[in-house]
Image (cartoon, rainbow, N blue to C red):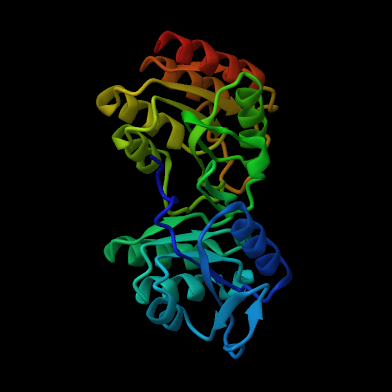
Amino acid sequence: MAILVGAETRLVVQGITGREGSFHATRNRDYGTNVVAGVTPGKAGQDVNGIPVFNTVADAVAERQANTAMVFVPPRFAADAIYEAVDAGIETVICITEGIPAHDMLQLYPYVRARGATLLGPNCPGALSPGVANVGIIPAQVFGQGRIGLVSRSGTLTYQIGKELADAKLGNSTIVGIGGDPIVGLGFIDVLERFEADSGTELVVMVGEIGGNEEEKAAEFIGAHMSTPVVAYIAGFQAPPGKTMGHAGAIISGSAGTAQAKKEALEGHGVRVGRSPTEAAQLAVEAYAKLG
């Protein structure tokens, strides 16, 4: 099985006639994802490498039964693109766009939740179920099919750990990049909950980073609700005190939000934490071997 994207995905790409939208729509389609439509206002009737283009998401839903949207719309229009997808009845919206204003996300987040839709991102690499569907910019060739779920705030660290698991002959059920912005759709707990319910996932690797308290909240969730084992890596052990690092969400308050504090919170709930991506991958290999 897989979570978020799979054989049932019928993808519409918003912003498909742009450079990035056309490239990744074609790349996702060539991987095997069922890309059924694209949307660019005013360009209905055209096609992008055989993918039909519509003026609105509602048209794509009516004509091509799209149920998942991938957003490659420029930042100032991206929030409106997400509103449009949700209003058209799209079940899952995956927003790759970086730079959406936090104020826009503050208004958008409760709107999406209230309507029962699922939002992944913004500023995320998307979701990949190896061998089945790729929605986003994840380099699928790095990953193999398997039974390890991977959820991460960092795209590049996800790719590194996925490669090391593949080198160890282990694969993934689904790889989910939740993005590093302060306000995102799905958080760690939302994805962990889905992995816990997924019969195709036997182990989860969680990749966090300094700043915020999402990892600490995830640790409590793991301790209270998960039977599926979890191993983790937190980026930023070498970050100098007081330094704001990387993603916009990486803001540290005192000792809270540091890599060490997050490590201790996770280990307090039975999660082994590596101090490097390589060590985290090795911990995953060891934990998976113990599952028999």
Observer able to see residue 237 = no
**Relative to 159, does residue 48 appear above or below in the rendering?**
below
In this image, 8 relative to 238: left or right? left
**If the image is split into quadrants, where does the C terminus sit?**
top left
Where residue 21 sits in the image (x, y, percent)? 65, 67
In this rendered view, identify the residue nearer to me: 270 or 39: 39
Where residue 152 sits in the image (x, y, percent)? 53, 37
Residue under the point 37% across and 33% down: 200
**If the image is split into quadrants, where does the N terminus sit?**
top left
In this rendered view, identify the residue nearer to me: 211 or 113: 113
Q: Quadrant of residue 158?
A: top right
**Relative to 194, does residue 182 appear above or below in the rendering?**
below
**Relative to 59, does residue 103 appear above or below in the rendering?**
above
Where residue 77 sits in the image (x, y, percent)? 57, 76
Observer able to see residue 288 = yes
**Relative to 126, does residue 204 appear above or below in the rendering?**
above
Give the total of numbered labels.
0
Q: Quadrant of residue 23?
A: bottom right
In this rendered view, identify the residue nearer to me: 197 or 154: 197
Residue under the point 27% across and 64% down: 114
Residue under the point 43% across and 72% down: 85
Residue under the point 59% across and 81% down: 40
Q: Quadrant of residue 76?
A: bottom right
Where residue 58 sits in the image (x, y, percent)? 41, 81
